[in-house]
Image (cartoon, grey):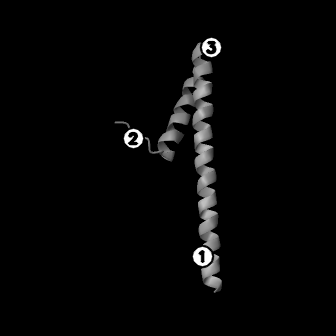
Amino acid sequence: MADNKFSYSKSKQALEDIIARMQKEGIEIDESLKLHKDGLRVADELITYINKAEIRVSKLKTDWEKKVSS
C-alpha cells in the first residue's frame, strides 16, 4: 500500500531532479515535454503546501498575540 502523505523535502528534491534532467543536452522533445508537465505539477504541490503553511503560521501568530494581550 502506498503512503500518500506529502513530503516537502521529497517533492522539492523531485523538482530539482526534474530540472537537472531537463538541463541535460540531447534530451528528446517528448521527454522534455513530459518532464515540464511533471515539474509544473510538483511545483504546484509545493506552492499549495507553502501557502497552507503560511496560513497556519499566521493563525498561530494571531492566536498568540491575542493570548499575550489579554
Please report whichever mark, 3 or 2, sits nearer to the chain's N-terminal start: 2
Mark 2, secondary structure of its residue: loop
Quadrant, the C terminus: bottom right
Spot occupied by residue 68 in the image (x, y as percentages of width and height) = 61, 83
- From this view, report whether residue 67 is shown above or below residue 39: below
Spot occupied by residue 63 in the image (x, y as percentages of width and height) = 61, 73
Reading the image, the residue beneath label 1 is: 64
Q: Are marks 2 and 1 in contact (CB under 8 Å)?
A: no
Neighbourhood count class around disc 2 (C-alpha, 10 Å): few under 14, some 14–19, many 20 upward = few
Alpha-carbon span between mark 3 and mark 1: 52 Å
Mark 1, secondary structure of its residue: helix
Reading the image, the residue beneath label 2 is: 3
Quadrant, the N terminus: top left
Q: Are marks 3 and 1 in contact (CB under 8 Å)?
A: no
- Residue at 55% x, 35% y is 15
Neighbourhood count class around disc 1 (C-alpha, 10 Å): few under 14, some 14–19, many 20 upward = few
Residue 29 lies in quadrant: top right
Q: Nearer the viewer, residue 45 or 13?
A: 45
Reading the image, the residue beneath label 3 is: 29
Please report whichever mark, 3 or 1, sits nearer to the chain's N-terminal start: 3
- Residue at 62% x, 20% y is 33
Q: Nearer the viewer, residue 55 or 29?
A: 55
Spot occupied by residue 53 in the image (x, y as percentages of width and height) = 59, 56
Q: In the rendered structure, find residue 11 and report the number of the disc placed on it.
A: none
- Residue at 64% x, 77% y is 65
Instruction: Tell me the kind of residue under disc 3.
Output: Ile
Residue 22 lies in quadrant: top right
Alpha-carbon span between mark 3 and mark 2: 32 Å
Q: Is residue 27 visible from the viewing direction of this image?
A: no
- From this view, report whether residue 11 is shown above or below residue 21: below
- Residue at 51% x, 40% y is 11
